[in-house]
Amino acid sequence: MTAMTSLQYIHKKGRFGDSNKKGGKNLLQISEVKNLAIIQLVQYKKSKIEPGTIKIGDLDLPLKSPKVTTDKETRILWNAPRTWLVISSKKNIISTIKDKCDDKNFAVTDISHSRAVIQIKGIQAKEVLKKGCPININEIQVNSCAGTVFNGITVMVDFVNNNPDTFNLLALRSFGETFYHHITDSALEFGYFGV
Amino acid sequence: MLEIKCPYCGSRSQNEFSYGGDSNAKRPELGKEVSDKDWDNFIYLRKNPRGKHSELWHHVAGCRQWFKVLRDTSTHEIFKTAKLTDEL
């Protein structure tokens, strides 16, 4: 049995908005990112372990905002002091994390089911974000992240790639539908392709 | 709209934050006898200055950390922000 994703009956595929005569990098793509393991890692206050010494696979835990460490399958986002989000396409990532982060020092929680993940990709991706996010999108660097709001909805913005600009946007699952409509409404002006 | 410098995330827009009140309110010591008046003062009595005010703010849409802000209540100028463990 396959788990139902948060946008399974919401996300529509095809061309929308002002997408005529646009294609390739000129056309914004919006998709739902599925089958990701999203693990929240929190170091207890009493823990004496230095997080800089811990590696998840080959990845260090980023120690400051807005750092993200990444390889092909896994991204580790700095979420807050002593708090990280590990986002991975590896199914067994939670056991890898638990091997490195023992339960006396860390709380490891699988929150994969509780997030809606939308990816926007294309040269206008930053323009779409600027419509709802108060952060300075022009200054955000590739492989960095920011916890912020989009039209009042709390989201995590993860800048995945800059060729073309690609952002993964994580919102609480229960806000997924509203958030999806906010993003797609903002993208209509540029035209988009639902993938 | 204010721009508030979170000690953990840097400068962000006010709508990522939530106001948490006066940072100088001190809870009566635990385990000691507290008079009704002292408790009432702790719960309800706050200074309401015109000028510099030390406040608590919560970066509710970002790192979810509480921190202190020294703000002018008449001009909204923010002079300094600090972690809870640090002095303003």
Image: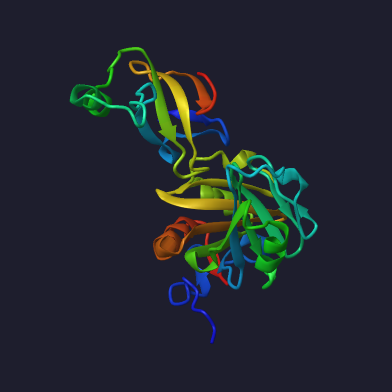
Q: Residue at x 54, y 52 (%)?
A: A156
Looking at the image, residue A49 lies above or below residue B28: below
Q: Residue at x 65, y 66 (%)?
A: A94
Q: Is residue B78 left or right of residue A43?
A: left
Q: Residue furthest bottom?
A: A1
Q: Where residue A136 appears, x then y in whole percent?
A: 56, 38
> In terms of image quadrants, where is residue A122?
bottom right
Q: Residue at x 40, y 64 (%)?
A: A174
Q: Where residue A155 appears, x then y in whole percent?
A: 49, 52
Q: Nearer the viewer, residue B31 or B86?
A: B31
Does residue A181 appear in the picture of this structure?
Answer: no
Q: Is residue A174 left or right of residue A104?
A: left
Looking at the image, residue A23 lies above or below residue A56: below
Q: Is residue B19 left or right of residue A12?
A: left
Q: Where residue B5 appears, x then y in whole percent?
A: 52, 29
Does residue A160 appear in the picture of this structure?
Answer: yes
Q: Nearer the viewer, residue A174 or B26?
A: B26
Q: Where residue A66 appears, x then y in whole percent?
A: 64, 42
Q: Nearer the viewer, residue A82 or A189?
A: A82
Q: Nearer the viewer, residue A141 or A20?
A: A141
> In terms of image quadrants, where is residue A104?
bottom right
Looking at the image, residue B51 lies above or below residue A149: above
